[in-house]
Image (cartoon, rainbow, N blue to C red):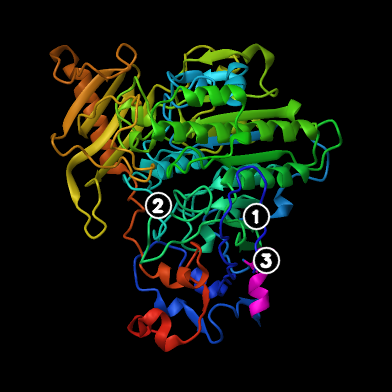
């Protein structure tokens, strides 16, 4: 098929990948049998339908033709076989508010990816001026100066969506959901978009999901979002949208669009910068809002934008039209190529932030919008992100791995709160009840979090924060995990915050990292992760006064005067370890690639049809089909 180069911002010349056909869900009975994480053989659930390899796709029982495959982008695929959740409230349109105009605020929740303490313009030592739009929103809003996320993507997003600690929802193990992971955020958890939808909001997600995708009930549009456009796993390339690691000898794309009833692959977008696609989807979502010209809507907007930036791989953004003259000057001051690529990705995200605000303004919605921003975890020095002067980084429980930049802004913020800094202790789980509070939604019982809205707006100042404790994490399994072997650790590895004090157990003594000033031999284009423990050191226990020593330079663990409080904190941590939820993590499922090799895309694989050609010679491994 002839290709026409795309001339939009971010598009690059080159061969566009071939159109890829669709997948079709299997029956409700099949889904009912796989809506759990129990590890077992799943071959009987994979159906093979004769015909030309995958060109003959199935949709509502109809076989397609090869020409149908060429129009895959415009063909919707049914998701009618998604089962109702047994323990979570099922979402129906009738649950939303009546068809009347309401004046609830629109809410934009934006999550940066792997953005460290030193990685946003207003808080950076070397990237000042790189993110003017984010900086303006922060300066005109409330900067959350004592805000903590988690040490990794999956547990952070799970905590954000549930208002609960990872230890209480099975998300505490120090591994993320990978493309082959047959697990996800427990389906019994009703998450933030479902609460918003049930209370009159239209809900849309764009960007990264990373909370489970192995079967359809874990998809974002099965859990409260009206639409989703983005990728399911932890990372993809910015232009060809492939997962950066080879899986079973192949590279797979990860880019889909979905509603509550159908989904399709973006099969003709190779060569277009991801953020350009996000902006197009943002325009569709915001442009579709029913507004009366005063920013009042029948259903207000809840927009979850989980940015791809600034997670590796650090693909170089070469289109300078994306950058302002001031940003170009900032780039010239950065002597290290890896850090410069990281800065470009930050600038791309800032451009998308500007687009969100402009589009809301164009629809007369901005004046009634609350904008919430956070990062999911600290920066990774092996992919251009830094947390200096804080200690450590992503994957670990020192401040550099968990303390992140965050703010609440937008015109819906009361005027007296604008331009302020909130020093109260706050955890990413607190954003869920805070957002519900702003939206006038009743906050559910059983959360590990509290609304900070009255504190953020200055309506309450005593105590300084509704929280005095943060369970940063507790894990009993060995780390890093060998995918073929899982072992219990000798004791809980975790971190607990009580007021000024922070206890860390069984942690390697990481150092302090700052951006290199010049290029060196360590450049890996951001593909290498930061999860390798420094094996030259044994694990140790630490106690810090974070208020007096935010850089964690003075270990107080062995100070006699603090032994009583140290022992009390250790007792508390051991109690948590003995009563936490069983981790949802399980070994990778190799069966997934049998499906993906037919579509070329990462997608749900349990309980779906495979339309294959020659069964006996399927990928040259007929023995793999014996159980069928």
* SS assignment for the magenta stretch, majority: helix
Which quarter of the figure has residue 575?
top left
Q: Label 1 belongs to which residue?
A: 5
SS at badge 1: loop
Percent position of residue 367, x then y: 75, 26
Q: Which mark is residue 586?
A: none
Q: Quote the CA–CA distance across marks 1 and 3.
A: 25 Å
- Residue at image position (16%, 12%) is 561
SS at badge 3: loop
Percent position of residue 276, x then y: 63, 44
Q: Label 2 belongs to which residue?
A: 177
Tell which of 95 and 35 is nearer to you: 35
Going from N to C along the chain, the mark reached first, 2 or 3, is: 3
SS at badge 2: loop
Q: From the viewer's perspective, tell me whether residue 418 is left or right of residue 39.
A: right
Q: In the image, which residues are magenta?
A: 66-78
Q: Is residue 453 visible?
A: no
Tell which of 454 and 139 is nearer to you: 139
Q: Label 3 belongs to which residue?
A: 76
Going from N to C along the chain, the mark reached first, 1 or 2, is: 1
Q: Quadrant of the C terminus?
A: bottom left
Check residue 485 for magenta coloring: no
Q: Quote the CA–CA distance across marks 1 and 2.
A: 34 Å
Tell which of 619 and 289 is nearer to you: 619
The reply to whether callout 1 and callout 3 are in contact (CB within 8 Å) is no
Please name which of the two marks, 1 or 3, marks the residue nearer to the observer.
1
- Residue at image position (68%, 43%) is 282
Percent position of residue 221, x then y: 60, 54
Q: From the viewer's perspective, tell me whether residue 428 is left or right of residue 93.
A: left
Crowding at mark 2 (Cα within 10 Å: few <14, some 14-19, many 20+): many
Percent position of residue 391, x then y: 30, 24
């Amino acid at each position: 098929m002839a290709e026409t180069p795309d001339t939009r911002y971010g598009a690059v010349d080159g061969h566009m990948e071939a159109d890829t056909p669709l997948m079709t869900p299997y029956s409700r009975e099949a889904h009912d049998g796989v809506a759990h994480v129990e590890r077992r053989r799943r071959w009987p659930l994979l159906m093979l339908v004769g015909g030309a390899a995958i060109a003959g796709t199935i949709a509502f029982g109809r076989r397609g033709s090869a020409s149908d495959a060429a129009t895959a982008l415009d063909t919707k695929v049914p998701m009618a076989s998604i089962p109702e959740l047994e323990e979570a409230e099922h979402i129906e349109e009738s649950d939303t508010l009546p068809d009347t105009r309401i004046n609830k605020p629109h809410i934009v929740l934006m999550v940066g990816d792997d953005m460290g303490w030193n990685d946003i313009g207003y808080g950076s030592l070397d990237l000042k001026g790189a993110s003017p739009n984010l900086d303006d929103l922060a300066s005109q809003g409330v900067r959350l100066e004592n805000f903590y996320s988690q040490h990794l993507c999956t547990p952070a997003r799970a905590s954000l969506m549930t208002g609960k600690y990872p230890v209480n929802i099975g998300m505490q193990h120090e591994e993320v959901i990978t493309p082959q992971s047959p697990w996800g955020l427990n389906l019994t958890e009703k998450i933030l978009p479902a609460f918003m939808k049930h209370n009159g909001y239209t809900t849309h997600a764009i960007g990264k999901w990373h909370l489970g995708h192995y079967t359809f009930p874990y998809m974002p549009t099965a859990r409260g979002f009206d639409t989703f456009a983005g990728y399911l796993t932890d990372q993809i390339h910015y232009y060809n949208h492939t997962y950066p690691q080879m899986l079973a000898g192949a590279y797979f794309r990860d880019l889909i669009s979905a509603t509550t009833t159908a989904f399709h692959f973006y099969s003709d977008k190779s060569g277009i910068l991801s953020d350009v696609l996000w902006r197009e989807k943002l325009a569709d979502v915001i442009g579709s809002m029913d507004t009366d010209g005063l920013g009042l809507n029948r259903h207000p907007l809840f927009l979850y934008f989980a940015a791809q930036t600034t997670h590796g791989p650090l693909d170089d953004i070469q289109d300078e039209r994306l950058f302002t003259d001031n940003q170009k000057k900032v780039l010239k001051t950065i002597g290290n190529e890896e850090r410069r690529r990281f800065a470009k990705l930050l600038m791309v995200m800032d451009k998308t932030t500007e687009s969100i605000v402009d589009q809301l303004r164009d629809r007369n919605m901005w004046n009634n919008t609350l904008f919430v921003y956070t990062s999911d975890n600290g920066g990774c020095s092996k992919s251009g992100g830094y947390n200096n002067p804080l200690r450590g980084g992503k994957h670990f429980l020192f401040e550099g791995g968990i303390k992140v930049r965050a703010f609440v802004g937008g015109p819906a913020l009361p005027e007296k709160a604008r331009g302020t800094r909130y020093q109260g202790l706050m955890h990413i789980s607190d954003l869920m009840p805070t957002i519900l509070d702003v939206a006038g939604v009743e906050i559910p019982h059983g959360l590990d979090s509290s609304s900070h809205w009255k504190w953020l707006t200055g309506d309450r100042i005593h105590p300084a924060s509704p929280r005095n404790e943060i369970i940063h994490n507790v894990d009993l399994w060995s780390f890093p995990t060998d995918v073929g072997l899982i072992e219990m650790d000798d004791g809980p590895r975790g971190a607990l915050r009580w007021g000024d004090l922070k206890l860390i157990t069984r942690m390697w003594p990481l150092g302090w990292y700052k951006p290199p000033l010049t290029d060196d031999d360590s450049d890996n284009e951001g593909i290498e992760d930061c999860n390798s423990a420094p094996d030259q050191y044994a694990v140790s226990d630490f106690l810090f006064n974070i208020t007096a020593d935010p850089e964690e330079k003075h270990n107080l663990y062995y100070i006699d005067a603090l032994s009583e409080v140290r022992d009390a904190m250790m007792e508390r941590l051991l109690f948590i370890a003995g009563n936490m939820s069983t981790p949802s993590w399980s070994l990778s499922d190799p069966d997934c690639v049998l499906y993906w090799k037919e579509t070329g895309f990462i997608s749900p694989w349990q309980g779906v049809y495979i339309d294959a050609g020659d069964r006996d010679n399927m990928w040259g491994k007929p023995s793999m089909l014996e159980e069928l």
